[in-house]
Each structure stands twice: as structure tokens, then as C-alpha cells.
Image (tube, grey):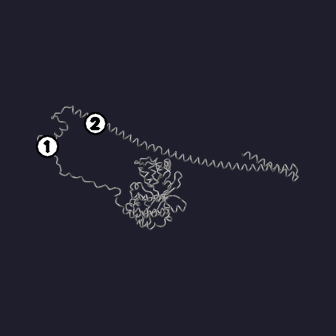
Amino acid sequence: MARATTIFIFLCMGVIAASVSAIMLFQFARPAGEAFSLGLAILCAMVVVHLVFTRQRDRSDVSARVAELEERVLEVDQDVGNLEGRLTGMETNLPRRTREEIDPLFAEVEVLGSLIKQMAEAMAGMEDRIDEQDQRLVAPPQPRERLGHYEEAPRALGYSGIDRTNEQAPPPPRVDPEPRRAPQPPPAVGPRETPPDLALRRTIQEALDNNRVDLFLQPLVTLPQRQVRDYEALTRIRDHNEVYLEPVDFIEEATRAGMMPAIDNLMLFRAIQVLRRLTNRNRRSGLFVNLSSQTLVDEKFFPGFLDFLRANDGFSDQLTFEFSQRDVSEMGALEHESLAALADLGFRFSIDRVTNLRLDFKALSDRGFRYVKLHAGRLVGAERMPDSHIHPADLGDLLRRFAMELIVDHIETEAQVLEVLDLDARIGQGYLFSPPRPVRPEVLQGRPPKAMRRAAE
């Protein structure tokens, strides 16, 4: 096609040059030599211009091909770098995994060896005792006059032995009419019966009264792209010295004192404010908000909680309520009814702080749970979960069968990222991507509605 086009262009140039020569010869009555010279010059000029444009077009095509080739080379380099990272991670983790799998086997072999050794020693001792009993049965009785070494020694010290001639039978054992009862040990005090920490309780109440309860956000990213997908809302309390207290420091005492509904009230109101700011910026990121099971059964707070959520039903697809595995396992009929009311409004749930995988994922999915958070140390690290009936590597596929998603949190190293990717996890969270950061004060303005405040109080 290109060759035919070139031939057609040169024919057109020849026709143009011949036409110019004919015009100069017949129209302007110029000499034939001058007319043919002018036509030949015009033909040469057109050929040169065509060659110049053709060369520029070829150069642009070559440059485009070279740029495309460079992009392909960069992509190959990135793939090679990722492959090298994975190989490095495999070289680093393979000996550790092999050692973790072989060490228990060696320990069991050592235990079996020690048991076999103890059994052999016990059998040898039993054979020796049998031989001694056989010798005692066969040997003749020793005369009384011949005393052994251990009988001669007391007599040398003046002890003549026990006179059994006037020995009477021992009296019968005395039986008490009513046996004495053994003293009962004091009842053990469980973890929920620890005495209250009045100082910490006072600190929590002062933080609520003086608006020293702050909201922190930590992103949840997609893997391997590491793009921000959602955020988790974390609660921090400041004491009078402006020192932050994390949830692990105050949640138990706040639950014991019945303050969790007030804290959840404030956190929910601020979460809605954050979602409004994200929506105004055309960002559809969701928000995970931790909720206490105590809030679900609070008759004063929960109705106002539902009314506030109905007034903000537009955020149901962006707001996910998170419960710990301990709270989920201890939920009763009232908690399940409250969860059903939230699920009817379109809200989803997540379960975190998972310590074992003996969970009924189908029942959780039917109740509205869509996410399961698992510690990276329990998924790929040395901290295993012995009570689990499924290997963590198969957890992601199992959850997807029930329309749930696995979130791996507490990711702190690149090696953990590679291992998590090998286990087909799609969402990650941890200090490697970003630590929790406080929300600016200008975003968190205003106070919850009066109905919710009165219910929380």
C-alpha cells in the first residue's frame, strides 16, 4: 500500500512538471530548453520536499516506537524488581518456616526418646525387683541368734529390743461421730471481678466532660496497589496532663462504669462529620467505627442512636460498625435484635481482635458481617492459633464464599506484605502504610443532637 502511494505521488509530480513546461512553451512562447529546465527544476523541488516530509515522519514513528519500547523495558524492570523482592522474601522466610515446622517434630522425637528411655529403665527396675523376690522365696530363713549389722548396733548402745511377751493387741481406731469438714478455699476472683480503678474512671469522666476525647484515623489500603480504601476511627482520651490513653488502657474500666454508650455516642457523631467532609471532597472512602456491645443493649441510648442513623441513612454504605470477637461470642438475644435493626438500615459489620478461627462464618454473614480482621502476626508470623480448625492460608477463599472479606492489620514490615500477598489477602492495615493520625479540630465541630446527649447522660 505504501509503495503504491509513493508511485502515485511521483506520477502526480511528473504530471505537474510536464504541465508547467507545456504552459511555458505554448502559453508564454518560451524556448523549449527553458521550459523543460523549469519543469525539471519544479520536479526536483517537489521530490526533495516529499523526501524531507517522509524522513520526518519516519523519525517520529521511530521515536514513538523507541518510547514505547522504553516503557515496556521499565515495566519489565519493575516486574523483575518485584520478583527479586519475592525471591528475597522466600529466601528469608523459607528457612524460618522450615525451622518452625521441623522444630516441633524434633521436640516430639526427643519426648518419645525420653519416654522410651524411662520405660526401659522402669522395665529393668521391675526385672531386678522380680529377681530379688525370687531370691527371697528360695533362700532359707536366717536364725534369730545371728544378728545382722543393723541389729548389733542398737544392742551395743544398750537397747535390747522390744519385749513382745506381754504385748497386747493395739486398740481399735477411734472413729469420730461426725467427721470434720476440710476448710474450703476462698473463691477465685475472675478477671471481671477486679476492683474498679477510681482514678481512671475519674479521668474518663473528666475527658468526656471537658471534650478531651479525640478521633484518630488509620487508613485501610488495597494490596498490592496500596491505595487508600477506607479508614478506621480510633478513640483516644487525653488526661489532665495531655497524655493520650489508648483504648486498651481505658475500655475495660469504661465498660465496667457504663461509660461506653457516651463514648460511642460522641464517636458516631464525629464519624458522620468525617464522612460528610470526605463526601464533599468527592471521595467515597468508608469508615470503620468500633462499637461496644454495651451500647446495643442500653435502653436509654440505643433508640436515639437509631434515630440519628435514620437521619443520616445516606452514609449506610460507607459506615461499618466493628465488634471484637469476644463481644460477638458473648452476644445474646437483645444484642442480636439490635444488630438486626442496624442491618435493616443497610449498615455492615466487622469483627476484629480475632484470637481463633472457630467461627460460624455463615451465621456471621447472615447477620450482616462483611469483614474479618486478623493480626498479621497470627496470619503469617510465629504467633499461631492452636484452637483454629482452618489454616490461615485458606481463610481468604473461605470468607469470599460467604460474601466476606479478610483484612490483615498490624502490618509493620515489607516481608509481611509479601507473605500476605501470597495468602491472597486484598486489604491491609498497619504502621507500615500509615500510623493513626488525629483529625483536625475544625472538622470536628459541634455537639451531638440533644436526644442523643440526654440518652447518653
Q: Residue at x 50, y 55 (%)?
A: 220
Q: Residue 126 carries which label?
A: 2
Disc 2 residue type?
A: Met
Question: x%, y% of residue 109?
Answer: 38, 40
Give the number of callouts. Answer: 2
Question: x%, y% of residue 268?
Answer: 46, 62
Question: x%, y% of residue 56?
Answer: 71, 50
Where the N terminus falls, by quadrant? top right
Q: In which quarter of the image is residue 235?
A: bottom left
Q: What element carries label 1?
A: loop
Mark 1 and mark 2 lie on one chain; the one further toward the N terminus is: 2
Q: Residues within 10 Å of mark 2 (few under 14, many from 20)?
A: few
Q: Is 31 left or right of 383, judged from the image as shown?
A: right
Q: Are marks 1 and 2 in contact (CB under 8 Å)?
A: no
Question: x%, y% of residue 296?
Answer: 41, 60
Where the C terminus falls, by quadrant? bottom left
Q: Depth check: 115 or 360 in front?
A: 360
Q: Residue at x 43, y 52 (%)?
A: 363
| Vertical position of residue 77 compared to residue 317: above or below | above
Q: What element carries label 2?
A: helix
Residue at image mark 1:
169
Q: Residue furthest bottom?
A: 450
Q: Residue furthest left?
A: 166
| Vertical position of residue 441 compared to residue 429: above or below | below
Q: How crowded is mark 1: few (under 14 residues within 10 Å), some or many (20 or more)?
A: few
Disc 1 residue type?
A: Ala
Q: Residue at x 41, y 66 (%)?
A: 455
Q: Which mark is residue 439?
A: none
Q: Is 192 left or right of 218, judged from the image as shown?
A: left
Compute the Cα span from label 1 to label 2: 36 Å
